[in-house]
Image (cartoon, grey):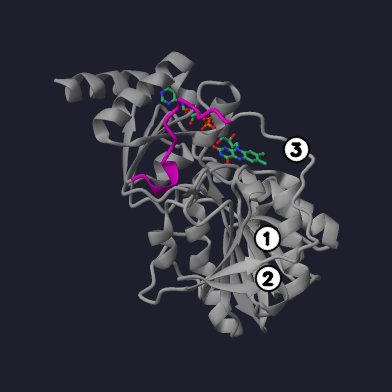
Amino acid sequence: MIEKIKLEDLKKENILAFGEIYQGKLHPSSLEILTPLKEIAEKLDKSLILVCLADSLESIHDLESLKKSLADEVWFIFHSKLRDFKDDLYARVFIEIIKSTNPYGVFFPATLIGVSIAPRIAGVLNLGLCAHVNALEIENNQIIMARPTYGENIIAKLTSKTIPVMATISIGAFSPKTSEKTPVFKEVIFPENFSWESALKVRSFRSSKKKPSRLSTAKVVVAGGRGLKNKENFQKLFELAEILKAEVGATRPVCYEGWVEEERMIGVSGVTVKPKVYIGFGISGALQHTAGMENSEFIIAINTDKEAPLVKMAHLSLIGDAKKILDLLLKKLKR
Ligand SMILES: Cc1cc2nc3c(=O)[nH]c(=O)nc-3n(C[C@H](O)[C@H](O)[C@H](O)COP(=O)(O)OP(=O)(O)OC[C@H]3O[C@@H](n4cnc5c(N)ncnc54)[C@H](O)[C@@H]3O)c2cc1C
């Protein structure tokens, strides 16, 4: 049962989190960001609200995950015009909520949709926005946001000069948690004069044939770097991944070379992974990469250079040619 409530009657001064629903599916990172935000909200004595935009309740497939989420309340905004993602309309809906409920913080997962609307909202409301945060804490009753900076070589701790505090949070930086207490579901009724029009028109929707990557939640990750030498060798990682039920990850240079799509990039500019086993083939272990995999439980490095930082950091290292070792491994596993 969902309570209907007018926008102007909603609770004020909360911590808001964007619950991204796309084609009826809740993006897992919307639940991940609730983990640090719950702690923050409790310390600041604020309510944690997940804000979801969709065309109708029936169109949402993941209500069970929402029921187990850490949010105190889930606010739904339903309208037929919200069926397809439109940056301008989504941003305006959020701006209306912010203006009306005067939140203390507004946070977005750093998904394509999150990083598209957060700066639009911050720009219109003249607010600061901290991008790609990977740690949050409270000091002197203030939210401190940590993110890599200066060529991603150091971690900067930032506070916001404007309220609400706004940030996008890196995908995979936190693990989602569940709560025994079901959040209160509310359907927010917008004022009649609110315009649901958008400058964008979605003509058609075509699903990608590609299987979506589950890198941030994978139990085993096989990753490749420049030491694999070429795209053809890199592609063999997919064969290994299939056998090990793993996901394929990569370093930034090989994504930029076009050996694999950028969504598989691990590190400060990509995804954070925390698998039980991470195997790095021909990866040097630059800080920008290791920041995204250092919490893996067991790290295996394959490299010709025994001085490579990833080799030094690994629990097990194989010193040798990455392609040769990969071929041998595949041969053995296939047998
Ligand atoms: C602002 C900024 C953001 C960045 N963000 C990211 C990020 O998110 N993720 C990321 O990965 N990088 C990122 N980088 C790039 C990062 O600094 C490194 O350049 C990159 O991680 C190195 O990739 P690599 O290990 O594939 O290549 P290299 O550093 O060139 O290392 C290749 C390794 O392969 C080994 N090797 C060579 N031949 C063989 C062989 N035959 N067999 C086995 N091993 C071999 C070498 O000894 C070496 O250790 C960023 C850089 C900047 C400046």
Mark 2 lies on residue? 105
Q: Position of residue 207 (x, y in %)?
A: 50, 30
Mark 3 lies on residue? 200
| Residue 201 image-quadrant placement | top right
Q: Amino acid at mark 3?
A: Leu
Query: Going from the N terminus, do you reach mark 1 or mark 2 first?
Result: 2
The image shows residue 228, relative to residue 133, as above or below, that is above
Which of the two marks, 3 or 1, is nearer to us in this view? Answer: 3
Q: Residues within 10 Å of mark 3 (few under 14, many from 20)?
A: few
Residue in view at x 76 percent, y 61 percent? 95
What secondary structure is the magenta-colored segment mainly?
loop
Residue 159 visible from this viewpoint: no
Which of the two marks, 2 or 3, is nearer to us in this view? Answer: 3
Residue in view at x 68 percent, y 60 percent? 167
Specify the segment rendered in magenta.
Answer: 205-218
Query: Going from the N terminus, do you reach mark 2 or mark 3 first?
Result: 2
Distance between mark 1 and mark 2 Cα atoms: 8 Å
Are discs 1 and 2 less than 8 Å apart at CB?
A: yes
